[in-house]
Amino acid sequence: MSKYFITTEATADYPENLMREDFAIIPMSYTVKGEFYDGKDRKLSPKQFYDACREAKTAEDLPSTSMVTAYQAEEFFRPILQAGHDVIHIGFTAALSGTLDQLRIAERNLAQEFPDRRITVIDSKSACFIEGLVAYCALLRRDAGASYDECIAYIKEIVPHCCGYFTIDDIAHLQRTGRVSKAEAFIGGTLHIKPILTVDDEGHLIPFAKVISRKKAMRYLLGMMKKKMLPASEQPLIAIGHADALDDAKALRDEVVAETGFDNVIIFDVGTVIGTHVGAGMLALIFSGTDRNYR
């Protein structure tokens, strides 16, 4: 029998070029301009999606997402278990979605259906490729020979050290999700204020700073990373995510390499599920750090 599977969700924004054997991603559906996309057989490219976001004229035109149901999770996991594999699933933070609860229902149901197999759902307390970084590190540990139980213990140990900082181009998207008031959104948009956000130890998305201008926001992300990042020997990679802002992502990558000397820096697309809530132009800087304390 091959190694146990590690799985995660589309919210991890996991890049294709990092895919490995015995690894799978649960697709997640979304709706854009009234059109339904299942995220698997029918989906938009990142460019198409963010163009649609920019073109939205009414609230009805803006994208929306659906969480994974227990039934969908069971349908996803069942073939893996039927093939004789155990599963460790790294899930999207329970602080931002009910998906993890649904996954745990599926976990309990499938444990009864497959008493000889093991399935464990772990809260990554993360979003975007912070969640993906947890999965990436888990895959490295598994492929280095860790047992099922050793890998679970390792994942729980590294969750607080998978860190990320974000900036959003349009503060109005935060107002839509209740993170800032309408007045704050108006003032932010008027003054070109760019919020800085992170994910805390419980997996909440926290806006904790504001700067004026995109360039200053990018420098702020880099400054926070330099304060928090682990040494190169403990840094599997640094990841820069963008929501249809490739030029900015490349510029930030060049600054990261120049100022840290660490050159294993990847660029990835922020996918449609996360993109629904952050909008076009979002930038993320993700790495292994000492802690998630943003104060």
Image (cartoon, grey):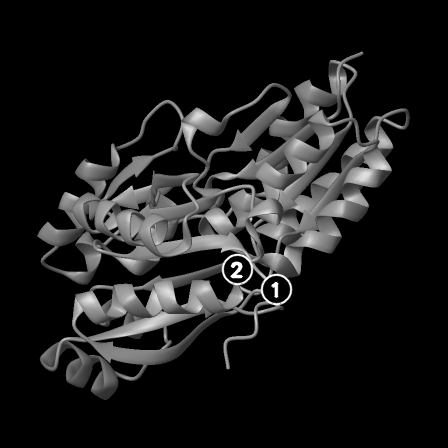
Q: Quadrant of the N terminus?
A: top right
Pick whichever, 32 or 84, lies toward us.
84
Picture coordinates of residue 187, whole percent (x, y): 16, 85
Q: Is residue 14 above or below residue 239?
A: above
Question: What label sits on residue 229 in the rendered view?
Answer: 2
Element type at mark 1: loop
Q: Residues within 10 Å of mark 2 (few under 14, many from 20)?
A: many
Return the x and y of residue 175 as percentages of the image width and height: 29, 74
Query: Is 239 above or below relative to 199?
Result: above
Pointers 2 and 1 in contact (CB under 8 A)? yes
Q: Say left or right for 217 vs 74.
A: left
Name the side, left or right, on which 185 lies relative to 147.
left
Q: Which mark is residue 246?
A: none
Residue 51 in sight here? yes
Residue 257 position within the rendered picture, expressed as x and y whole percent measured from the top left: 35, 48
User: Identity of the amino acid at label 2?
Assistant: Met
Given residues 260 and 200, the one toward you in this image is 260
Is label 2 in a helix, a strand or a loop? loop
- Looking at the image, which residue is at 55% across and 69% down? 200
User: What's under tag 1, amino acid-wise?
Assistant: Thr
Residue at 82%, 33% in the rendered image: 148
Q: Is residue 68 left or right of 234 when viewed as pictured?
A: left
Residue 290 badge: 1
- Between 2 and 26, the one nearer to me in the picture: 2
Q: CA distance from mark 2 to mark 1?
A: 6 Å
